[in-house]
Amino acid sequence: MKEAVTTREYYQKLYPYDQLVTWLTSQGHALERIEFAMEGRSADGAKIFKRYVVATSAASLRRQVGAFTGIRAFHIGGIYPEACDRKSAPTERMFSVDIDLTDYDFLTLTDASGEVSPALCDKAYPIAAFALFVLRHLLEHAFGFERILCCYSGRRGVHLHVMDQAALSLTNEGRSAVAAFLNICLTKDKKRAQSSVRRLANMYGLMDAVMDAFTRSVVGEMDLFGDSNKRLQFLDNLQLTHRSLDDLETDVVDKEDGPAAWAEIHSRVLNAGVPWFEERLQDTVLAYMWPRMDEKVSTAINHLVKAPFCAHASSRRVAIALPKASYTNWDPARAPSLDAWDKDAWQRAQEALAPRSAPEPEEEAISDVEDVVPRSIPRPQPPPRKLTFKRKRSPLVPDMAL
């Protein structure tokens, strides 16, 4: 029988500190150089947050996290020249990416009470999974990074962390350049991806995978076009005018289901006889599928990020690591939950952290999405240390200063 586990019991007895420390120190950094931060609640419900926590071993980290008042989670920060100290500044940090499904404006994720629904986030997980696929593909093939850990966030998204030394050493300017390279860049009206995103997708052999994932996952599994209003929104984003498309809106709404509506859009646009219409369709689909990153998480060396395997305070699910071979078809409902602890599922989840200090074998990358990507793609380039180009700031982070 599955029993509930308290948050404190989880952090005191079950959290995989040894595996985490092995991963964090895989590039030879002493653990005491890495900043940790604790997040908790007082007896009266007030938030408590403590930065610049220093741990010298896995046992030391376990002791401090488990003893923190009302512990809810702990975070990982930058790497300091010597021991972490509030009087100095970090000079290195793992490169992290945060994908939050609430940043995808076409998704409906709130329930009748206005709260983010775990069930609706679970249904939208294919969007987050495809973002991981794109990000990992670009980080591997554009920059040559190998030590990449992908994680479920515990409720409404995913996280990705890069532990290669070249990624750890990136300056803030270099991190901004990498983030700008990876992130969605929308048109002024926010209806489509800019053509630069399409060119990048084509350069790295991702465009077919984008269209395939949109068809199978978003239209198929998620049934986006099951709602006629979503069909009309897509056509509005498409913004195409042609005599052969005059009755497209009516025909699309009249279709019996979402896949039939998408098939009608796809066929009519491609058969209109206008070459650039296909690019417009791709740009529209890219706005749905390309990663929408919280760039602040990626760009600042002193930024904190929640540690892998933390338990989400609301959903009570554990933010487990996702193996490369399975994250595109993984079900978030399978994540270990403190409300119904499954020892076998927990043991399997911990095994995913094993590749933390070495690249995962290419032969393990087995998924339908991977099969769509051609092998002839550009050679990896070294990550930039300084921002050498200007790109329009992400509409999701309007106050970001490049």
Image (cartoon, rainbow, N blue to C red):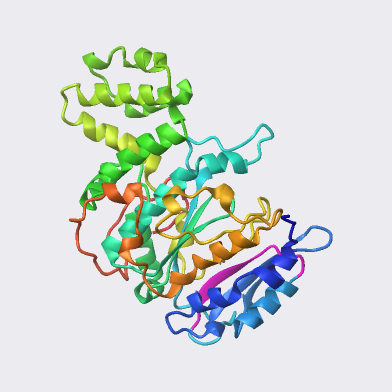
Q: Is residue 32 magenta?
A: no
The picture places residue 393, in percent across and down from the top left corner, at: 38, 51
Q: Position of residue 193 (x, y in %)?
A: 33, 40
Residue shown at 60% from the left, 75% from the top: 17
Q: Is residue 98 left or right of residue 268?
A: right
Asked if residue 201 is positioned above or below residue 82 in the image, the reply reads above
Residue drawn at 32 percent across, 71 percent down: 385
**Residue 79 magenta-drawn?**
yes
Residue 221 shows in this picture: yes
Q: Position of residue 398 (x, y in %)?
A: 46, 49
- Above or below, 120 relative to 135: above
Residue at 30% of width from left, 68% of height from top? Answer: 383
Vertical arrangement, residue 83 with respect to residue 316, above or below: below
Kindly tell me whether residue 292 is visible in this rendering.
no
Across and down, in percent, residue 153 comes to 55, 55
For the magenta stretch, what is the residue range? 69-80
Rendered position, 369 above or below 296: above
Q: Residue furthest front?
A: 1
Outermost residue toward the right? 44
Left or right? Give the position of 67 relative to 357. Answer: right
